Amino acid sequence: MASLSTEAQTCGFLLAAALHAATGSWTAPLTALIPALLVCAVAGMRAGHDPG
């Protein structure tokens, strides 16, 4: 489980660093974070839903 967390954090950091390098600002990486958070929230609610 730790390796999956490490991989996710590394990919997220690299994506944020690439967006920061491309735009010169942290606005784009932070703006990209909002849809990702929404997708994760919906997936988490669906995964935790009791269908019965």
Image (cartoon, rainbow, N blue to C red):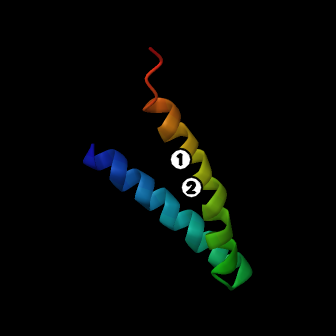
Which residue does the image show at 68% across and 79% down from the upper left? 27
Disc 2 element:
helix
**Is 46 situated above or below 15?**
above
**Is 48 situated above or below 18?**
above
Q: Which mark is residue 13?
A: none
Q: Are marks 1 and 2 in contact (CB under 8 Å)?
A: yes
Which residue does the image show at 69% across and 73% down from the upper left? 28
Q: Position of residue 37 (x, y in %)?
A: 56, 55
Residue occupying the far top of the picture: 52
Query: Quadrant location of the C terminus?
Result: top left
3, 47: nearer the viewer = 47
Residue occupying the far left of the picture: 2
| Residue underneath mark 1 | 41
| Residue underneath mark 2 | 37
Q: Amino acid at mark 1?
A: Ala
Q: Is residue 47 left or right of residue 4?
A: right
Q: Position of residue 40 (x, y in %)?
A: 53, 46
Q: Amino acid at mark 2?
A: Leu
Which residue does the image show at 40% across and 52% down from the upper left? 7
The residue carrying pointer 1 sits among few (fewer than 14), some (14 to 19) or many (20 or more) residues within 10 Å by Cα, namely: few
Residue occupying the far front of the picture: 52
The residue carrying pointer 2 sits among few (fewer than 14), some (14 to 19) or many (20 or more) residues within 10 Å by Cα, namely: few
Which residue does the image show at 43% across and 60% down from the upper left? 10
Calculate the distance from the C-alpha at mark 1 to the C-alpha at mark 2.
6 Å
**Residue 20 falls in image quadrant:** bottom right
12, 51: nearer the viewer = 51
State the count of labels: 2
**Is 29 situated above or below 8?**
below
Query: Quadrant location of the N terminus?
Result: top left
**Is 51 situated above or below 18?**
above
